[in-house]
Amino acid sequence: MTTTPTADWLRLDQQICFSLNAASRAFGGVYRVVLKDLGLTYPQYLVMLVLWEHGDLPVKKLGEHLRLDSGTLSPLLKRLEAAGLVRRERSARDERSVEVRLTEEGAALRERALQVPRRIAGATGFDVDEIRELRARLDQLTAALDAAALEETAALEESAEQGA
């Protein structure tokens, strides 16, 4: 942005966040169509991906994988449970913890879901290497933004302490 005139910094077409949001919404539109055959929404699909990859998980751990809090995750899990794809059960080891388990139907859905990534990749118009490179760059961006948010939060807390 250093070569962009300061007056242009507040233009919508200069905002990376807007470009990322627009791309995310476009992905959402494609996923909505592709996932319709599976009877899943995009957030439900993400939950299923984590469970197919990791197996039974506590709700807290599932939320960590998805970067979702329990308030957002609970309604998703309720709908997946009502659809017969997962079961939620209190942990035998820790009554405070709820485990999420795939049902037979949920595990079987994995086979039908195998076509989803291929269809999404095809919709991007990118080849596999371009997709890997973009994902790696987005992972770097996420890590940098997470670190910046921590620094900003610490600076705000320090400023509040000095003002008190």
Image (tube, grey):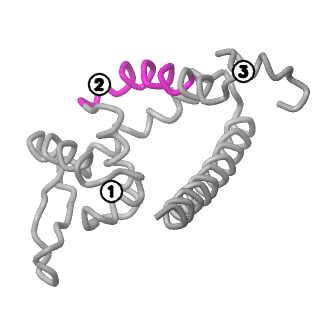
State the residue position of label 2: 37
Q: What stretch is highlighted in magenta?
A: 23-39
Of labels 1 and 2, earlier in sequence is 2
Residue 95 rendering spot, x and y as whole percentages: 10, 77
Amino acid type of the residue that numbered disc 3 sits on in the rendered structure: Gln
Taking the view exactly as shown, the residue that stands out farthest to the bottom is 93
What's the CA distance linking mark 2 and mark 3?
37 Å
Verify whether residue 27 appears in magenta.
yes
Q: Name the residue nearer the viewer: 50 or 150.
A: 150
Of labels 2 and 3, earlier in sequence is 3
Q: Residue at x 86, y 20 (%)?
A: 5
Q: Name the residue nearer the viewer: 152 or 127.
A: 152
Q: Residues within 10 Å of mark 1 (few under 14, many from 20)?
A: many
Of labels 3 and 1, earlier in sequence is 3
Q: Residue 66's mark? A: none
Q: Which of marks 1 and 2 is in front?
A: 1
What's the CA distance linking mark 1 and mark 2?
19 Å
State the residue position of label 3: 14
Q: How crowded is mark 2: few (under 14 residues within 10 Å), some or many (20 or more)?
A: few
Pointer 2 with pointer 3, Cβ within 8 A: no
Element under disc 1: helix
Amino acid type of the residue that numbered disc 2 sits on in the rendered structure: Asp
Q: Residue at x 59, y 60 (%)?
A: 155
Q: Residue at x 25, y 49 (%)?
A: 73
Residue 76 rendering spot, x and y as whole percentages: 22, 43
Q: Residue 51's mark? A: 1
42 left or right of 27 in image: left
Q: Residue at x 29, y 23 (%)?
A: 36
Verify whether residue 61 appears in magenta.
no
